[in-house]
C-alpha cells in the first residue's frame, strides 16, 4: 500500500511526518474526518475498523468487512474525498472478539476474519494476538503471540490476489494496549524497554522468514509499543518524551519500521507532536473522537431544551442513558460506580463506552428527531456560542453551517486538528 509506505519512508528519511488512524464506525466522525482532510489538503485518510466493530459475524456495528468498506466509501463520495487517497485498515485483528473460546477455535475465526478484511480491500492490517483465550495462560507468552501473528499474516497473504504494489502492509507487536482505554490503575504505567522492543521485532522477523513470509516482512511498517501514554475513566497519562528517549532511538536503524502509538486519545497537541517527532509516526485515535461526538450531541440536547417545547423534544440524552441502563453489556465490566457516580461514568468516562450504543434503534431515532427539531428551529449564534464555542468559531469562519450535523462535525474536527498539526507540522 504505497500511500502509507510513502509516509513511513519519508519519516525514516528524517522528515517529521506521520499519519492519523481514525478508529471509528460512526458516520458523523468519518464524515468529519473527510471534511477535515479536504480542508487541510491531507495526502491520505486512514480509517480503521476494529475486530469488535466489524467481523464475519457482524461485530457490534452489524457490518462485515465488505459492508464497512461500502459504508466508508459512500461517505467519501458524499464529501467529495478522492477514493484513491483513502486507506482502510483493520485494527486489533486477532482472536479478541472470541477470547471466550479455546485458542484454536478463536484463531480459526481470526483467520477467516483477516482473510475477509483483505478480500474486502483493507490494506493496513494490525496483527494483534496479544490476548489470552479460554485455555491460554495469562499473560500469553510473547513467542505464542508472535507465532499466532505469523499464522494470521499467512491468512492475509493467501487472501490477497491483486497488484503487488497494493499488497497489504502490516503492524506487529506484543505490548498492545487494550482497545478503548485501560481498566486498571494507571499509576505504574511502564514504558516499553528498548531491549524488549527490538527483541519483539527480531522475533517476528525470524518467525515470518521461517514461515515463508519474507516478502510480507518487507511490508511490516510498524510495531506497537507502550510509549507511556494511556487513559482510563477520568485520568490521562501524558506523554513524557524524556521517559521514551532510548525507546525512540532504538527504532531508527531498523529498516522500514516506525512505532504505532495506541491510546493517544486526549493527549495534548504538543504531546502528539512530540510522539511523531520521536518516531511514533502512526497515531491511533478512537474514543477521543467519539467523546467529542458525545460532547456535541449533549450540547445540542441542551440547545433543544432551550428552544423546543417540552412535548416535542427528542430527549436524546435521557433516551441514551435509559438504553445503557437497560442493556449494560457494553459497560458493566468497566464501570463499577453506583447512583449518581454511575450516571456520570455512563456519560463522561474517557473510555467512552457510550460509543457502542449509537447504533441502538431507539438512540438513533432520538438523534434523528433532535436533528429534525434543530433544523426546524435553527439555533441562534448566541446559543451555539454558549454550548458549542468551538463549532461557533468554525461557523463564523465559514467552514461549517448551523445545521446540527455540521455543528457536530465541526466539534469533532477540533480534535482531529490536533492530530493534523502533529502529523503535518510543516504544512
Image (cartoon, grey):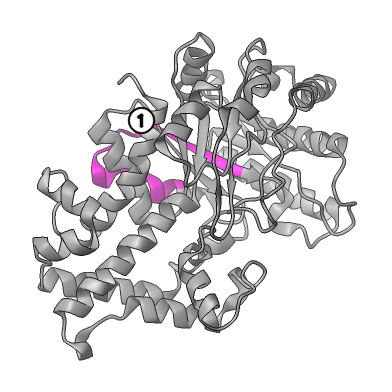
Q: Quadrant of the C terminus?
A: top left
Query: Residue 409 versus residue 89: which sits nearer the camera?
Result: 409
Residue 91 is left or right of residue 404, and the answer is: right
Picture coordinates of residue 66, whole percent (x, y): 50, 48
Q: How many marks?
A: 1
Vertical order, 377 against 71 (above or below): below
Picture coordinates of residue 2, whole percent (x, y): 48, 20
Q: Is residue 86 magenta?
A: yes
Residue 169 visible in the current orientation: no
Q: Residue at x 26, y 34 (%)?
A: 38
Q: Residue at x 78, y 49 (%)?
A: 108
Q: Residues within 10 Å of mark 1 (few under 14, many from 20)?
A: some
For the stretch drawn in magenta, what is the main secondary structure?
Answer: helix
Secondary structure beneath label 1: helix
Residue 18 visible in the current orientation: yes
Q: Is residue 251 magenta?
A: no
Vertical order, 173 against 301 (above or below): above
Picture coordinates of residue 278, whole percent (x, y): 55, 22
**Range of magenta residues:** 69-91
Q: Residue at x 64, y 12 (%)?
A: 255
Picture coordinates of residue 403, whole percent (x, y): 16, 60
Q: Residue placed farthest to the bottom in the image? A: 311
Residue 74 is left or right of residue 159, and the answer is: left
Residue under pointer 1: 421
Query: Residue 76 versus residue 112: which sits nearer the camera?
Result: 76
Query: Residue 215 versus residue 421: which sits nearer the camera?
Result: 421
Query: Residue 134 versus residue 280: which sits nearer the camera?
Result: 280
Amino acid at each position: 500500500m504505497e500511500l502509507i509506505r510513502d509516509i513511513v519512508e519519508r519519516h525514516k528519511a528524517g522528515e517529521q511526518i506521520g499519519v492519523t488512524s481514525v478508529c471509528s464506525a460512526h458516520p458523523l466522525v468519518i464524515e468529519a474526518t473527510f471534511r477535515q482532510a479536504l480542508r487541510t489538503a491531507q495526502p491520505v485518510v486512514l480509517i480503521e475498523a476494529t475486530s469488535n466493530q466489524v467481523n464475519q459475524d457482524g461485530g457490534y456495528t452489524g457490518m462485515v468487512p465488505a459492508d464497512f468498506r461500502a459504508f466508508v466509501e459512500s461517505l467519501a463520495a458524499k464529501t467529495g474525498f478522492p477514493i484513491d487517497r483513502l486507506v482502510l485498515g483493520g485494527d486489533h485483528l486477532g482472536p479478541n472478539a472470541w477470547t471466550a473460546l479455546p485458542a484454536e477455535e478463536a484463531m480459526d475465526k481470526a483467520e477467516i476474519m483477516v482473510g475477509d478484511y483483505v478480500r474486502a480491500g483493507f490494506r493496513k492490517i494490525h496483527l494483534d494476538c496479544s490476548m489470552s483465550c479460554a485455555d491460554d495462560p495469562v499473560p500469553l507468552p510473547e513467542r505464542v503471540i508472535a507465532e499466532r501473528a505469523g499464522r494470521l499474516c499467512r491468512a492475509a497473504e493467501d487472501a490477497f490476489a491483486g497488484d503487488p504494489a497494493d499488497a497489504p502492509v502490516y503492524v506487529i507487536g506484543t505490548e498492545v494496549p487494550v482497545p478503548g482505554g485501560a481498566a486498571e490503575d494507571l499509576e505504574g504505567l511502564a514504558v516499553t524497554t528498548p531491549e524488549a522492543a527490538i527483541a519483539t521485532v527480531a522475533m517476528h522477523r525470524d518467525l515470518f522468514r521461517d514461515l515463508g513470509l519474507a516478502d510480507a516482512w518487507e511490508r511490516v511498517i510498524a510495531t506497537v509499543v507502550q510509549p507511556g501514554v494511556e487513559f482510563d475513566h477520568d485520568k490521562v497519562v501524558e506523554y513524557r518524551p524524556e521517559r521514551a528517549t532510548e525507546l525512540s532511538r532504538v527504532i531508527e536503524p531498523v529498516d522500514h519500521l516506525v512505532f504505532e502509538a495506541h491510546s493517544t486519545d486526549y493527549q495534548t497537541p504538543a504531546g502528539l507532536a512530540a510522539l511523531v517527532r520521536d518516531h511514533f509516526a502512526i497515531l491511533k485515535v478512537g474514543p477521543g473522537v467519539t467523546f467529542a461526538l458525545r460532547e456535541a450531541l449533549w450540547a445540542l440536547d441542551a440547545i433543544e431544551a432551550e428552544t423546543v417545547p417540552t412535548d416535542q423534544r427528542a430527549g436524546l440524552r435521557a433516551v441514551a442513558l435509559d438504553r445503557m441502563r437497560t442493556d449494560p453489556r457494553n459497560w458493566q465490566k468497566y464501570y463499577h460506580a453506583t447512583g449518581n457516580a454511575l450516571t456520570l461514568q455512563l456519560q463522561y468516562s474517557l473510555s467512552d463506552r457510550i460509543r457502542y450504543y449509537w447504533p441502538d434503534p431507539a438512540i438513533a431515532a432520538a438523534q434523528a428527531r433532535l436533528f429534525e427539531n434543530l433544523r426546524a428551529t435553527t439555533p441562534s449564534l448566541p446559543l451555539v456560542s454558549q454550548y458549542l464555542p468551538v463549532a461557533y468559531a468554525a461557523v463564523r469562519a465559514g467552514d461549517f453551517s448551523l445545521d446540527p450535523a455540521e455543528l457536530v462535525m465541526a466539534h469533532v474536527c477540533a480534535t482531529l486538528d490536533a492530530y493534523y498539526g502533529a502529523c503535518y507540522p510543516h504544512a
